[in-house]
């Protein structure tokens, strides 16, 4: 067993794991920050909704669909000038966060829109019948009622971001993906590849378990 792990530098492994967690945490927080309002707007401006605006909905949907259709590896490269302008570098953890957010926010927004569509229309109509404004309907009825679906969306997005952080290693973003590419793939160090993949699998399992429990918790409320 020790002979198999001859190429493993555990300090580098834990450093890469920490970088992956930082990328995941920061990008997930920003994805929710931007994606949640975008998903709410997509829902509200849709046909028959509270703020029905066909033109605005068409434009928002087109932008979301366009960003979702671009492969993440291509997005990483295309966004290099924008990333440099925003954070001063396209490398390392900081350089990975902008494309991670741009890649994940539209995906999350669509999931939020789907979660809001699952809310019982009768509950919304009852809230409006009591004189609630649009903002009150959103914050006191729609979002609370859609919490299980939104937490499920956060979980799915977090798992997707783990794979995105691995792909970000292609452009030197750091983290487990970068380690797997530079050592596991380019230097044919199979043990490094196995360990990095195993750690990412563990991370995905932890995220899924925590997310599933949050969904169950908010479903019972």
Image (cartoon, rainbow, N blue to C red):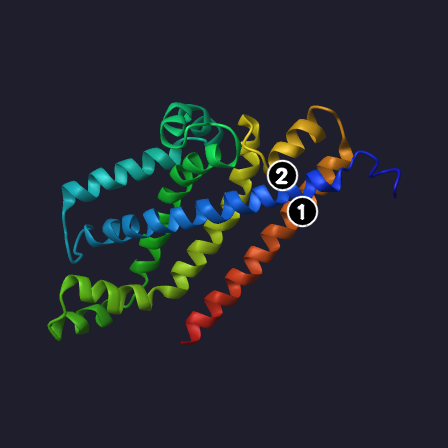
- Residue drawn at x 18%, y 62% is 135
The CA distance from mark 2 to mark 1 is 8 Å
* Closer-to-camera residue (53/77): 77
Residue at the image position 63 percent from the left and 39 percent from the top: 176
Q: Residue 57: give x, y in percent of width and height.
A: 20, 44
The residue that disc 1 covers is 199
Q: To which quarter of the image does residue 103 belong?
A: top left
User: Which of the two labelled residues, at mark 2 and mark 1, occupies the earlier sequence position?
Assistant: 2
Q: Quadrant of residue 121?
A: bottom left
Label 1's element? Answer: helix
195 in relation to 153, above or below = above
Look at mark 2 in the image and give the residue it sits on.
176
Residue 20 image point, x, y percent: 57, 43
Mark 2 in CB contact with mark 1 (< 8 angstroms): yes
Q: Going 48% across and 52% down the picture, which residue do you hit?
A: 156
Q: Quadrant of the image for the C terminus?
A: bottom left
Q: Position of residue 13 (x, y in %)?
A: 69, 41
Query: Residue 93 — which label?
Result: none
Q: Secondary structure at mark 2?
A: helix
């Amino acid at each position: 067993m020790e002979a198999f792990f001859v190429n493993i530098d555990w300090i580098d492994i834990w450093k890469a794991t920490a970088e992956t967690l930082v990328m995941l945490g920061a990008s997930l927080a920003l994805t929710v920050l931007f994606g949640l309002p975008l998903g709410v707007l997509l829902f509200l401006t849709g046909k028959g909704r509270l703020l029905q605006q066909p033109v605005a909905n068409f434009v928002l949907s087109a932008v979301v669909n366009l960003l979702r259709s671009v492969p993440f590896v291509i997005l990483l490269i295309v966004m290099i000038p924008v990333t440099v302008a925003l954070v001063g570098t396209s490398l390392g953890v900081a350089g990975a966060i902008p494309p991670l957010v741009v890649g994940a926010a539209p995906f999350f927004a669509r999931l939020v829109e789907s979660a809001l569509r699952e809310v019982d229309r009768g509950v919304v109509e009852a809230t409006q019948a009591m004189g609630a404004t649009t903002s009150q309907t959103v914050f006191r009825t729609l979002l609370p009622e859609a919490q299980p679906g939104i937490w499920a969306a956060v979980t799915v997005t977090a798992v997707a971001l783990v794979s995105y952080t691995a792909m970000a290693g292609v452009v030197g973003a750091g983290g487990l993906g970068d380690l797997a590419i530079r050592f596991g793939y380019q230097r044919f160090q199979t043990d490094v590849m196995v360990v990095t993949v195993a750690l990412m699998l563990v991370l995905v399992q932890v995220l899924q378990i925590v997310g599933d429990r949050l969904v169950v918790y908010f479903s019972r409320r």
